[in-house]
Amino acid sequence: MISVINIKGDKSITHRIIMLSSIISNDIIIKNPSNCIDVLSTIDALNLCGANIIINNNEITNNSKVHKNPNSILDCGNSGTTARLLIGLLFGMGISATIDGDSSLRSRPMDRVLDPLESMNLKYKSLNKKLPVHLYSSKLNPKNTYTLKVASAQVKSSILFASFNNPVKIIDKFGTRDHTERMFKFFKNNKEHRIEYFVPGDISNAAFIICAGIFIKDSNFLIKNVLFNESRNGFINVLKKMNADIFFKNVTEIQNEKVCDILVRYNPNLIPYQVSDNIIVKMIDEIPILAVVYCFVNFKTSLSNLSELRIKESDRISEICSHLNRGNVDIIEKNESLYINPDKKLYNTINITSKDHRIIMACEVFNLIISKKISKKQHSEVDISFPDFYKIISNLVK
Ligand code: S3P
C-alpha cells in the first residue's frame, strides 16, 4: 500500500516570501509556510522593523511593512539566510539596525554580502566582517549588473532585495538557487492586490525521507507537492542516475516554481554514478544525506568541490566524517573532497554530538536504516529546519 506524506513548505522560499511581503505593497497570504525556527528568526526581525507578521493555522499574513529602525538587536539565531538577506533588505529600505546571531552564525563569513553591498554605498560597522554587524541608514547607489563572485544564493538574494526598487541584473555562472528571481518575476507579472502564495514542500527536507525510503525494506510512499526546481534537484537527479526507484508525478507549475509528487520505493540496488563538481551547488544542503546514501551502496564513491560546506552551520565535511566513522564507515576527507569506501560492516552506533541540524538528521537516518528503530533521544536542533522530522521518519518504520 502506498502511504502519503505531506511536507511543510520550503525554508528558502518561506524566508523570501515573508521578506517580500514586508516590502511590497500587495497583501500576501502565505499558505503552507515552513514551520521551522530559522523562519521564526526572520519573522521576529522583520516585526521589530515595523512589519506585523502573524502565523495562524499553517498560514502567514502580514498587514504592515518594514518602516522603522528597530529598538533592539535583530537576533538571527542560527539562520544564515535571515542574516544575509536581511542585511540587503534593510539597506534597500534605509533602515539602521544591529544584526546578530548565535555562536555558529557569528563565526560565518559576512564579507560575501557586505563587500558587494558596500560597493553600492552600504555603510556599516563590524569586527572582521562577521556578526554582530551594525548597519547605518544608507542610500543605495544602484548598479545595473552585478557578477556573483561566490557560489551563494544568499549573496545573490541579498543584492536583489537591496535593489528591489532599482532592479539589478545578476550574472550567476554558478547556477545557485533562483527562487528570489522567480518570485520577483511572479509578482511583477501579477496585477492582483491580494495574492495567496502556496509554498511548495521543502525538497531539502524530503531528501532525508527519500534516503530512508530507498534503504528501508518495503517502503512505498508518495511525498506530495514537493518543490521541483532545477537549481535544487541535484540530489534527486543523482539518485535517479543511480537507478533508485523514485518517480516524479503530477509535475505542475505554481507561482513560477515547479512542483511535483515524489514516489519512493525500497530498492537498495544502486549503480555507480560520478557526481561532477558543477552539480554540488544544486544539492549544497544535501551532501550530508548523500554521504549516508553512499554508505549503503556496494561501490566506492567520492565527492569534490565541497569547500562551501566548511562554512555552513558547522564544518559539514569534518562533522559528517567524524560522525559516520563512529558507525564504522570508511569515510575520509581530503581538502575539499570526501571519499567513501562502503566495504565494512556498519553499526547503528553513531553517538550524535553535532549541533548542526542537517548533520543530526543525516546520522539519525543512518542509524534508522541499520536498526529500523528511532533513537530514544530526540535532538531539538532539527527544529532549526525540519520540526516534523521525527514524526515523519518514525512512521516509516511502524
Ligand atoms: C540558501 C542558500 C544556501 C543554502 C542555505 C539556504 C538560501 O546557502 O546552503 O541553506 O536560502 O538562499 P549559500 O547561499 O550560502 O550557498
Image (spheres, rainbow, N blue to C red):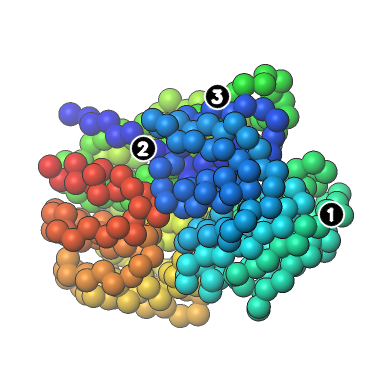
- Closer to the N terminus: mark 2 or mark 1? 2
- Closer to the N terminus: mark 2 or mark 3? 2
Q: Amino acid at mark 2?
A: Ile
> Can you identify the residue that label 3 sits on?
196
> Can you identify the residue that label 2 sits on?
7
Q: Is residue 58 above or below residue 385?
A: above
Q: Is residue 33 above or below residue 158?
A: above
Distance from label 2 to label 1 (Cα)?
40 Å
Is label 2 in contact with label 1 (beta carbons under 8 Å)?
no
Residue 234 visible within the image: no
Callout 2: few (<14), some (14-19), or many (20+) C-alpha neighbours within 10 Å? many
Callout 3: few (<14), some (14-19), or many (20+) C-alpha neighbours within 10 Å? few
In which image quadrant can residue 297 be found?
Answer: bottom left
Figure disc tally: 3
Residue at the image point whose x is 32% and y is 76% from the top: 322
Q: Secondary structure at mark 1?
A: loop
Of badges 2 and 1, the one in the foreground is: 1
Q: Is residue 352 above or below residue 243?
A: below
Residue 168 visible within the image: yes
